[in-house]
Image (cartoon, helix red, strand yellow):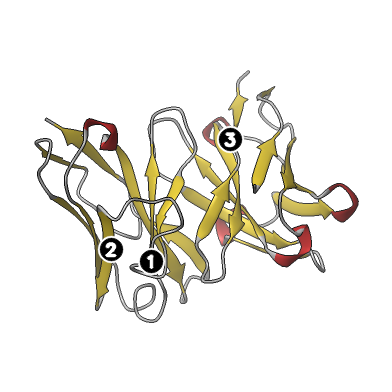
Amino acid sequence: QSVLTQPPSVSAAPGQRVTISCSGNTSNFGSNFVSWYQQFPGTAPKLLIYDNSKRPSGIADRFSGSKSGTSATLDITGLQAGDEADYFCGTWDSRRNVKVFGGGTKLTVL
Amino acid sequence: QVQLVQSGAEVKKPGASVRVSCKTSGYTFTTSDINWVRQAPGQGLEWMGWVHPNVGKTGFAQKFQGRVTFTRDTSITTAYMELTSLRFEDTAIYYCARGGLSGEFDFWGQGTLVTVSS
């Protein structure tokens, strides 16, 4: 059971927009930044979003993140077949003193 | 460019220990912590802990207390994770990841599969 809650799967057609949610509580989301990771089968996760909404160099602006209260969202616009992957949110939990992740969301591009 | 290259796959028996290495390059090793994250087959990500290469300070998830050790060798810019008293449920891919300024993991190793089997 992951500390952060994500939907197990989402799907949308090419060109459409999809939103992946991530919910937690005040001990993790309260005062800590959220990051998002993209993972293709058989490969390591890759940083997609950090500091709630910033993109590392090389990440397309089709990917955006936001945080409000005890939840965060990852938005992907202009969906492409190559976006099919698992997406994880992560943050620090100040009460447990550990880094916590969501259970991951599998994105299917129809 | 920043790179983290991990050691190869391991097969261990229950009760044994495993050490995984993480060779870094492309940045100043002592300026960023190295985190260890594992992923059981078909499961999500689980943070194990970290080591800061500058002074060797470590932190770890309570779940692994007494079983995990994080070390580093600054002369060869390499971090290590040792897990002892292995159990079947420790079978997973173990990743090292560089810690960013806000706690994000900005670069990851390719992963090391550790299989615990009798």
Q: Can you name the residue that lies furthest to the right here?
A: B75
Mark 2 is surrounded, within 10 Å at the Cα level, by few (under 14), some (14 to 19) or many (20 or more) other residues, namely: many
Report, in whole angstroms, how far the alpha carbon at label 1 lies from the one at label 2. Answer: 7 Å
Visible residue check, residue A26: yes
**Residue B54 location, x and y as percent?**
80, 67
- Amino acid type at mark 2: Gly
Q: Which residue is mark 3?
A: B111
In the image, what residue occupies the spot 63% across and 18% down?
A: B118
Residue under mark 2: which chain is it in? A
- Amino acid type at mark 3: Gly
**Residue B105 location, x and y as percent?**
53, 56
Is tag 1's residue or tag 2's residue first in the polypeptide sequence?
A: 1
Q: Which residue is mark 1?
A: A54
Please, is residue A11 above or below residue A42 in the view?
below
In the image, what residue occupies the spot 69% across and 50% down?
A: B68
- Are the numbered discs 3 and 2 placed on the same chain, yes or no? no
Residue under mark 1: which chain is it in? A
Nearest to the observer: residue A46 or residue B21: A46
- Are the numbered discs 1 and 2 placed on the same chain, yes or no? yes
**Residue B110 location, x and y as percent?**
58, 35
- Amino acid type at mark 1: Lys
Report, in whole angstroms, how far the alpha carbon at label 3 lies from the one at label 2. Answer: 26 Å
Please, is residue B66 above or below residue B32 in the view?
above
In this rendering, the label closer to the viewer, 1 or 3: 1
Please, is residue A55 above or below residue A30 in the view?
above
Q: Secondary structure at mark 3?
A: loop
In the image, what residue occupies the spot 54% across and 34% down?
A: B93
- Whether residue B39 sits left or right of residue B70 in the image: it is left
Q: Which residue is mark 2?
A: A65
Visible residue check, residue A1: no
Report, in whole angstroms, how far the alpha carbon at label 1 lies from the one at label 3. Answer: 25 Å
